Image (cartoon, grey):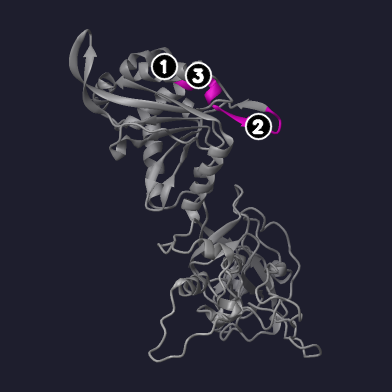
Amino acid sequence: MAQVLEFKLPDLGEGLTEAEIVRWLVNVGDVVAIDQPVVEVETAKAMVEVPCPYGGVVTARYGEEGTELPVGAPLLTVAVGASSAGGSEAGPAAEPASSSAQASGESSGNVLVGYGTGAPAARRRRIRPAVPGAAPAAPAERAPAPAAPAAPAYVEPTPAPAAQPAVAGHAGLNGGVAVRDAGVGPVPVISPLVRRLARDNGLDLRQLTGSGPNGLILRADVERAMAAAEAPPVPAAGAAAPTTTAPVATAPSPAAVAQTGMRGERIPLRGVRGAVADKLSRSRREIPEATCWVDADATELMAARAAMNAAGGPKISLIALLARICTAALARHPELNSTVDMEAREIVRLPEVHLGFAAQTERGLVVPVVRGAQSRSAESLSAEFARLTEVARQGALTPADLTGGTFTLNNYGVFGVDGSTPIINHPEAAMLGVGRIVPKPWVHKGELAVRQVVQLSLTFDHRVCDGGTAGGFLRYVADCVEHPSVLLRTL
């Protein structure tokens, strides 16, 4: 007999609490193998294909494409040991595991964080009757064959307490089985984010018609209802004057009333944009930052790069030379390659330089990290910058590629601007900003000349050092830009 196992959205690491379903890779009724990717999700850090730790037949999927799910919410259910629509056993599709392991519900050892290492007990999904004494719903194991699968149990109807208001707080995921609101009738919602959005805007979910499977209410349904509530009513010709009593379902919340007149386009802060907003806000709240800047003559640095590339071999990028200068400066001023532990009230100086660099992509600003930058040559740095930039443009950076940085290099000169006051990439202690390199009048060897000039700005955490240290770091960087031979002392 088939054993139905529920696969929940795993912890994807690095403190991520939710993910948006981008694309389902399997359908209900498909046979999946152990560790086969079943869904592509977008987290605040990267696009990730999530593998299923069970082998068998997919009996239900939870969430449409575009739906945000919290970590621990059910993704799909798999009937282990069940027959596929064509009558073949699911076991061969899960070849990496033994048949006995499948029968006992054992999962793979291939983990994201929080699943895949144990043998979870079988769980039954039940729907409680709406009326006391009614016959209970059949357990999920007795659902029809995957060729004509039963709809997933999105809701759990309950009798309504008499004194409950029409709009109530959500009851949560209740173990990943179903959710319910106090009130009359079931509420077909699986995402707590959708429930919260409706509650914050004074919408009664029972008055909405879901556009998802089996009437599931999606975020888009709630947003349409919000827009309809804000739009002024258009009375029909000859119609009687409307009554002053409005239904509870359309009564706006105080927050909605306060936002009267704000009818512009609303763009949810989620995914990469949401992560950037959270991180920058936290940086400004927690880090007492200061910025210093200097203009530097980059003529000799540009000439040195041209000479390197003319000598043959892989091309050396400008950002790689600036990165090499940064690592040399951090070796002289290690205070800026650190982080602050306020709970222990300690400054933690880090032994290696994991250099982040800002990269603009179609998905927004991301900061890939070059590991062990202090031990790389300019040629190695050029290759790694190029590789990470290409992966970023493809949207294929992993959480490991985007975390663990200790210092950030921000080349905003590519946008045609001269200067900026960068916001520190929390929990780092500093960021070097580089503006565009342009011809400007400059006093060179006592005479006025046209030189290639760049503005360098350093934003630093004033808790880890004072202005003297920050100024010394920035002055050394400027000296290396103006006279690249200064780097020979540290090579």
Q: For residue 332: magenta?
A: yes
Viewer-side residue, 453 vs 334: 453
Say whether disc 1 or disc 3 marks the residue closer to the N-terminus: 3
1 or 3: mark nearer the eye: 3
Viewer-side residue, 16 vs 5: 16
* Cβ atoms under marks 2 and 3 closer than 8 Å: no
Q: Is residue 240 left or right of residue 465?
A: left
Element under disc 2: strand
Q: Name the residue under label 1.
A: 476
> Which residue lies at the image location 67% right of the left edge and 26% below the top edge?
346
Element under disc 3: helix
Question: What segment is highlighted magenta in the picture?
Answer: 329-345
Q: Please, is residue 483 above or below residue 94 in the view?
A: above
Q: Give, as a three-letter code, the residue at label 2.
A: Asp
Q: Where is residue 469 in the image (x, y as percent from the top left)?
A: 51, 17
Quadrant holding the C terminus: top left
The residue sitting at the top extreme is 446
The CA span between labels 1 and 3 is 14 Å
Q: Which mark is residue 341?
A: 2
Q: Give, as a three-letter code, the residue at label 1.
A: Tyr
Q: Where is residue 272 in the image (x, y as percent from the top left)?
A: 47, 52
The CA span between labels 2 and 1 is 28 Å
Quadrant holding the N terminus: bottom right
Q: Mark 3 points at which residue?
A: 467
Q: Please, is residue 259 above or below residue 345 in the view?
A: below
